[in-house]
Amino acid sequence: MAEVQLFGLWGSFFSHRIEIALKLKGVEYKFIEEDLSNKSPLLLQYNSIHKKVPVLVHKGNPIAESRVILEYIDDTWKGHPILPENPHERANARFWAQFIDEKCRVALRNVYGCQEKEREEEATREACELLKTLENELKDGRFFGGDKIGLVDIVANFIGFWLGPIQEALEVKLFTEERFPKLYRWSEEFVNCSIIKESLPPRDKLIPFMRRRYGLSS
């Protein structure tokens, strides 16, 4: 049994977050692909509460929930810190990571899953306001973590890569360079980092995956 195992799904940005962190730290791991329509007994054993991916197993001990796993990885393996050392900066990074998951991601999901034109316009306005707020946090750095990829960048992987295939699959344009110039440039910097690029799922495979997920024919 490998010392580090990651139970995940190839098209899941939650799973991809963990792969980024492990690769930044130089940690060898075994990726175990899950079929969420037929979850393995091990996944159900290791994450009996939520029964979801990702789950990291380290020396037989399971850790669930992507942001929790990211902090565990940072605490366990040295080199390329994911969180800043300064307590205030650490708290700030946690705040923006939570903002992305609980505000931005939810708002974008509401846009892409909306069936009514009037509600879609309202959801779009809300999502744009939240993305603009996030964009302002970039300031003048290459990444949210400054010159190096940190916690907020990793959690924002949904915006950095997944939004593109989702927008192409659904034929919508919300996240554009014209609307969010700094955030768009950040996304290009992010996906062009060698460690990020090598762990991204194939875009041509992800687009039909997203079409099926949103109930469209591929």
Image: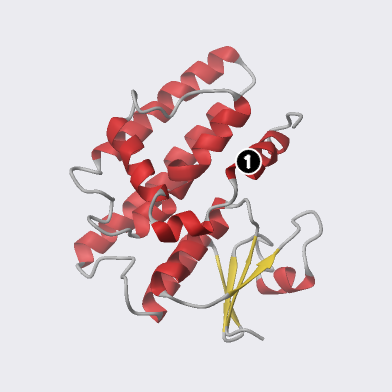
The answer to which image quadrant residue 50 occupies is bottom right
Coordinates of residue 48 in the picture (x, y in percent): 69, 68
**Can you say whether 187 is above or below 115 in the image?**
below
The answer to which image quadrant residue 170 occupies is top right
Amino acid beneath label 1 = Asp
Coordinates of residue 192 in the picture (x, y in percent): 39, 49
Considering the image in quadrants, where does the N terminus appear?
bottom right
In depth, the one of 116 and 162 nearer the eye is 162
Q: Residue at x 54, y 27 (%)?
A: 111
**Can you say whether 59 is above or below 171 in the image?**
below
Q: Is residue 41 left or right of residue 197?
A: right
In depth, the one of 50 and 139 nearer the eye is 139
Q: Residue at x 79, y 54 (%)?
A: 37
Coordinates of residue 24 in the picture (x, y in percent): 40, 68
Q: Is residue 93 left or right of residue 28?
A: left
Coordinates of residue 176 in the picture (x, y in percent): 40, 27
Q: Is residue 124 left or right of residue 129?
A: right
The colour scheme of the drawn protein is secondary structure
Pointer 1 local density, CA inside 10 Å: few below 14, some 14–19, many at least 20 = few
Q: Which residue is drawn at 33% across and 60% down?
A: 150
Q: Which residue lies furthest to the top in this view?
A: 118
Q: Residue tagged by mark 1?
A: 204
In depth, the one of 156 and 147 nearer the eye is 147
Visible residue check, residue 113: no
Visible residue check, residue 148: yes
Considering the image in quadrants, where does the C terminus appear?
top right
**Can you say whether 22 is above or below 130 in the image?**
below
